[in-house]
Amino acid sequence: MAARRWKVSDAALAAGLVATLLGLSLAQSAPAEDVCPAIPALKNISAPQYQNTNLVATGVSFMASLVHSFLYSVQPKPFPGDLIEKIINESKVPTNQETLQETIKEALWYEVGFLVCVAVAVLYIVLMPLVGFFLACCRCCGNCGGKMYQKQTSSINCRRRTLYGFTLATTLIILAGNICMFLSNEALKMSVDQSHKELSQSIGNLNTFLTAVPQQVDGVLNESYKTVEEAGRKLNNIGPELGKQIQNQFNGFLRPALRSVTTLDEETKAISTQLAQLNSSLAELQSNANRVQANLTASRSRLNETLSKPGCEGCDKLKPSLQKLQLDTSITVPGLKDLQSAVDEVVKMNLESKVTEVEDSFNSIPQRVTNETKDVIERSNQTLADINTKLSQIAKDFPLEFLTRLSNDVAVVQTDINNYMPYVQGAEYIRWCVCLAVCCVVLLVVVCNLLGLMFGPAGLKPKADPTNRSCTADCGGTFLMMGAGFSFLFSWLLMIVVLVLFLLGGNVYTLFCQPLKNGQLLQFLETPGLIPELDIGSQLGQENISVSISSVYRECEENRPLWTAFRLAELINLDDLLNVSKYTDQIQQEFDKTNISLSSITVLSPEVKQQLLDFSTGMKDFDTTSVTQQINDISSINLNTTADEIDKLATGQKDAIKSELQNEANQLRRIQFDIEINIIPELKTLNSSIKSLQSNWKKVNGTVGEVLNNVGAAQDSLNTNTTQIVKTESRKFLNCLLDYFLAFAAWAKLVITTQVGRCGPLAGTVDSVEVIVCAYTVESLNAFWFSLGWCILFFIPSIIFSMKLAKYYRRMHESDGFDDHIPMNSIPMNGFPMNGYPMNGFPRAQMK
């Protein structure tokens, strides 16, 4: 019962803690479907190790049924529970003489079977020595078979053989009883010798059980303390644990937005770098182009002067070609400045810092949860501290004091057994010697009879004169007479032993062993008020609990736990106390007091979004077609063709003009070489930069769209789902704690109702007492007196048969003749023939 009371207290406290923890919940939605972290494995209580108690039969079990049948015939009445209760009550309260006499009369009537046996035994004790005395006196006077004379008849041999058979049969019966006496005496000695060890083992197992129950209860308490400590650790760590769960939910839509912003920032910085490189290339290209333009303009001016000289023949045909000697060095990129400005604006936005701000706000969620739940955690920790204090009181509420007291009593019993065992063994040795002497007395009678039966026939000659019988035959007759004499001498003393042991062993069996075996004794001990110390309910501090000794014994016989044995379920309804719905009001109150709010997270401000939109729009004005055309125009210039025409024209001119034309042609070739060496590579580089910029521009344009979409979706989710996410994850977190406590409650219920205090040793101790006292001691004792009574009962026919048979072997003092051939020729009137023999064939007795 105490175990159950403990379990209920612990379960109620655990449920209260669950209610406090659920007060932190911010949602009334359905429990989360996510799987909670694995619940730490609860440690199973260790089962005590008991000693093996192998109680075996001691060798007289074959006589048990015979003795039980006899005792049932003597005492067929049921267990006198009412009579014993009446005697006990009268012993406590003085009663009048009339009531006392009525009780005595009732007790005597119950013991009438034993009284009849006592009367028979008393008659035997009184009559056997008297009969023996008078028979001895009678024989001394020559009567009662005392005269040493035996008639010889035709049936003498048949009578001798008949008496021999009866004497042998009774002797063998006595010998069988005597053997049983030896066996039962030795079995009783072995029972006493073994009882110390076996009883010590049983009491040791009981003491182990009584010691193990508090340890098992402490084991469950320790697990409850660990549960409370684990709950406190989780509560104190609510920021990291709950915050991480909230972050995981935010990651689903926030991380893609942040990644796209980071990508845009990286791509924008790459475009900014490319624009810087493009501007540098344009500046260098413009410088080289201006230099080439200046050289080409100077060369064209000199050619115009030369071709305009009067001595130049056919030079007018070359002047149109000179008009083509022009180089447009003004390379412009439409929209480049706007693009540069837009890119610079994006770079000035510092998107990386925006991402960092969002991440910092995201990473601060655990700390915010910790700050928001600080007051609730403090109240919960105080509740946990109170629960620990209450849990420490469970050991005081549990009836460990009763178990300790019982354990102390068991220890006292064990000490007393150890202290008195030497005296018991000494007394047992004396008893064994006395019983052995009794066995030897009976064996003496058997030996005398057997010697008489052996020597008598061995020395007897049937046709020999009775006065001339051999010494061997006479010795056999004497042994038979000795057996009869010893029977008369010791039988009444042995009957006293039988009477005492019969009254002791018979009543112990009928009043203790038999009722203990069939359960009547345990039911008697359950009588209210009979023995207050055996009232289990009052001993456990719960007088209203309906539990009986016999029911406890039956449950413990199957090694059931204390919860079942003491029917603690009748006192406490664990399922009702563990019902969390009972604490709904408390949960609601805590819910109303608690509010976890997270500051709003803005991924990108509306201004930044607008700037990105403008940036995407401005990039559409960036056109590379005209730049490409300009590069192609410059790349297509070929001054070598004009130089060849000038050389051809110079062939037919005068030396001065020819020399000037040739110099200008060479100058054009040098300018062309300068273009090919310096301008053309830069144009290729510029073209490559423009193509790369164009590729990145298209990518950035797509990234801006992705950024705006992701950021918009993330911001919408943050604005609309943040509160719900926090509520849902809070419920998940607290439901996990609830599952942890429910797992502990289920474990504690399973352990207390199925494992704590398996009371097999209690029933084992009762069984050991029954076996040691009844099956060992009482059975052996009853077998001894029954065997002894068996022997002395057959002493009576043994005396009769052996005394009559002895005369057929002993040497007679007077002789008697007998002849089977009777002459019939002369029969006188007086009945005697002439030869002196009477008609009946018997000789006249003659003195030796």
Image (cartoon, helix red, strand yellow):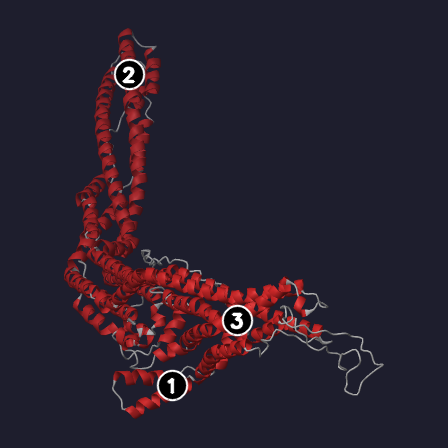
> Could you tell which of marks 3 and 1 lies nearer the N-terminus?
1
> Could you tell which of marks 1 and 2 lies nearer the N-terminus?
1
The residue indicated by pointer 3 is: 485
Say which amino acid is labelled 1. Ala
Q: Is residue 216 visible?
A: no
Q: State the mark number for residue 670.
A: 2
How far from the left and from the top, in percent, is residue 88?
31, 82
Q: How far, Cα to Cα, is label 1 from label 2?
A: 155 Å
| Residue at figure coordinates x 64%, y 74% from the top left | 149
* Left/right of residue 486 with respect to residue 726 in the rendered view: right
Q: Which quadrant holds the N terminus?
A: bottom left
| Residue at figure coordinates x 33%, y 13% from the top left | 647
The residue indicated by pointer 1 is: 107
* Left/right of residue 251 with respect to residue 361 in the rendered view: right
Say which amino acid is labelled 2. Arg
Q: Please say if the residues under marks 3 and 1 sit with CB atoms less than 8 Å apart.
A: no
Residue that lies at the very extreme toward the right in this rendered image? 825
> Could you tell which of marks 3 and 2 lies nearer the N-terminus?
3
Q: How far, Cα to Cα, is label 3 from label 2?
A: 171 Å
Secondary structure type for disc 2: helix
* Left/right of residue 757 with respect to residue 64 in the rendered view: left
The residue lying toward the viewer, choosing from 661 and 80, is 80
Say which amino acid is labelled 3. Gly
Q: How far, Cα to Cα, is label 3 from label 1?
A: 40 Å
Secondary structure type for disc 1: helix
Reply above or below: 323 against 165. above
Q: State the mark number for residue 368.
A: none
Q: Quadrant of residue 192?
A: bottom left
Residue that lies at the very extreme toward the top in this rendered image? 655
* Left/right of residue 610 with respect to residue 777 in the rendered view: left
